[in-house]
């Protein structure tokens, strides 16, 4: 059976001043450790989130070229399937380079002309020209200023392959080639049409 007198005696020993002080110090150290570690974990989570956001933006930029190709391929496929004598169509487009962005710039040009005469009566004309070019930025509500974009030049089509039902007939193949040339503005040697 449980001896209550013995338990009561031990509790009195624990309740002594030194033991109580040591327990309070240990509790205080534990509380400080918990607070410090939670602050550290929160800051590392925020850093991971900000890295993730930049990775997402980078992936969007890298996928821009692919999505542009896919958009053109889908539209071209849907258009080519409407041509008489053509069945199911597959289209593959390759691009030369990525999209080119032209930012707005502020150019300040200065020119000065100086006429000098020397003591022998000779004259000399000195012409000085300088130009200072700076990119114009949008100073909006965002934290980082973005350049003001004048225009975006989409990538040039390098080549197109069309695989289509009905392309084994020469006149259907010619229609498909002409349609691709017209839509994309490329010469015939960059378009290849194959039967399915």
Image (cartoon, rainbow, N blue to C red):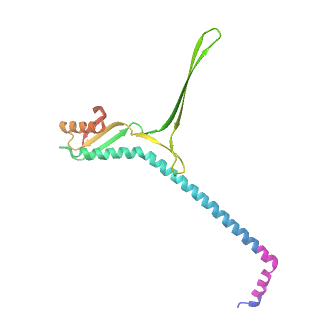
Name the residue located 26 percent from the left edge and 37 percent from the top edge.
Answer: 182
Q: Is residue 103 above or below residue 3?
A: above
Figure quadrant of residue 30: bottom right
Is 60 magenta? The answer is no
Magenta stretch prevailing secondary structure:
helix
Of 111 and 176, the residue lying toward us? 111
User: Magenta stretch?
Assistant: 7-22
Name which residue lies at 36% across and 43% down: 69
Pick whichever, 142 or 122, lies toward us.
122
Position in image of residue 117 (x %, y %): 61, 13
Q: Position of residue 169 (x, y in %)?
A: 18, 38
- Horizontal side of residue 117 vs 139, given as left or right: right
In the rendered image, the vertical position of residue 167 relative to residue 19, given as above or below:
above
Closer to the camera in the image, 141 or 56: 141
Q: Residue at x 79, y 86 (%)?
A: 9
What residue is at 25 percent from the left and 45 percent from the top? Answer: 79
């Amino acid at each position: 059976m449980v001896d209550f007198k013995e338990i009561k005696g031990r509790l009195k020993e624990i309740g002594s001043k030194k033991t109580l002080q040591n327990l309070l110090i240990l509790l205080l150290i534990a509380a400080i450790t918990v607070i410090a570690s939670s602050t550290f974990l929160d800051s590392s989570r925020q850093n991971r989130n900000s890295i993730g956001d930049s990775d997402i933006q980078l992936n969007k930029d890298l996928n821009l070229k692919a999505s542009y190709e896919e958009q053109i391929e889908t539209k071209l496929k849907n258009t080519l399937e409407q041509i008489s004598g053509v069945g199911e169509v597959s289209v593959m487009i390759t691009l030369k380079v990525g999209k080119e962005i032209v930012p707005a710039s502020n150019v300040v040009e200065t020119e000065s002309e100086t006429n000098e005469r020397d003591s022998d009566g000779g004259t000399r004309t000195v012409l000085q020209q300088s130009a200072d070019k700076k990119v114009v930025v949008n100073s909006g509500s965002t934290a980082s200023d973005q350049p003001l974009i004048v225009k975006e030049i989409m990538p040039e089509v390098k080549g197109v392959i069309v695989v289509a039902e009905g392309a084994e007939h020469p006149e259907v193949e010619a229609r498909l080639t002409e349609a691709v040339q017209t839509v994309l503005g490329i010469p015939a040697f960059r378009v290849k049409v194959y039967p399915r």
